[in-house]
């Protein structure tokens, strides 16, 4: 720090953040302001089947720190376009990430009501810390399928293999004449 109490510029020597114009002293050098970015591991998708809610696959939201950033980051959904129906749940495995959790991140998925329309939805996740807000964008793809009814028993007209013995169960009333 100079004699006239001016603060040091980026790249100059410091012993505390208050000596730097950026208020960021990293390893004894005035650094650019601390900051972070948010990233995600990909898009999500869900298939609504009949009248049942649908759960999407899970992705990971991670924090990348810059210039000594090590504050807690709070995660939330900033926007969804077009809007999802009432009853949609946005699930974070951890809505608050500390510096030790930055690289592991937080899992994120959605649970959709059966009334969700097929289509593509743009979701923006935000991370806030102090006065900083950073975002990451992802896409939710929703498909709708009618429930399928699968055959449980082999119909009688299917051919039997050599090692199978067909068993036919008939009600006693047919056999005994009731």
Image: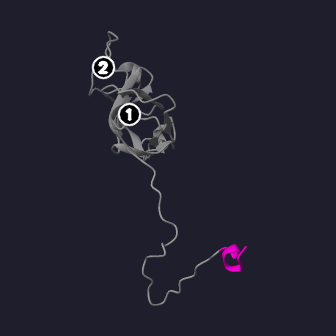
Q: Residue at x 44, y 34 (%)?
A: 70
Q: Earlier in the sequence, mark 2 or mark 1?
A: 2
Q: Residue at x 33, y 25 (%)?
A: 33
Depth check, front residue: 130 or 152: 152
Q: Residue furthest bottom?
A: 162
Q: Please, what secondary structure does the residue beneath circle 2 have?
A: loop
Residue 112 as seen in the image, left or right of residue 177: left
The color scheme shown is one colour
Q: How many marks?
A: 2
Q: Answer whether labels 2 and 1 touch (C-beta < 8 Å).
A: no
Highlighted magenta segment, given as a residue range: 171-178
- Tell me where residue 14 appears, x and y as whole percent: 35, 26
Quadrant placement of the C terminus: bottom right
Per the picture, the main secondary structure of the magenta-coloured stretch is: helix
Depth check, front residue: 62 or 5: 62
Asked if residue 175 lies in the magenta stretch, the reply is yes
> Residues under labels 2 and 1: Cα distance?
17 Å
Relative to 156, does residue 1 appear above or below in the rendering?
Answer: above
Q: Residue at x 32, y 16 (%)?
A: 7
Q: Which mark is residue 68?
A: 1
- Tell me where residue 79 appears, x and y as whole percent: 39, 26
Residue pointed to by mark 2: 8
Depth check, front residue: 69 or 165: 165
């Amino acid at each position: 720090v100079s004699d006239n109490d001016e603060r040091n510029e980026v790249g100059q020597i410091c012993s505390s953040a208050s000596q730097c114009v950026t208020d960021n002293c990293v390893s004894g050098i005035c650094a650019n302001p601390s900051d972070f970015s948010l990233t995600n591991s990909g898009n999500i998708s869900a298939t609504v089947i009949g009248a049942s809610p649908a759960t999407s696959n899970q992705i990971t939201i991670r924090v990348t720190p810059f210039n000594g950033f090590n504050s807690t980051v709070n995660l939330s959904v900033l926007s969804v376009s077009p809007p999802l129906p009432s009853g949609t749940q946005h699930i974070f495995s951890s809505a608050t990430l500390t510096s030790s959790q930055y690289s592991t991140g937080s899992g994120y998925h959605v649970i959709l009501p059966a009334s969700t329309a097929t289509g593509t939805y743009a979701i923006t996740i935000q991370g806030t810390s102090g006065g900083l807000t950073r975002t990451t964008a992802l896409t939710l793809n929703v498909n709708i399928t009618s429930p399928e009814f699968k055959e449980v028993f082999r119909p009688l007209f299917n051919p039997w293999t050599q090692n199978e013995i067909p068993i036919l169960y008939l009600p006693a009333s047919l056999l005994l004449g009731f």
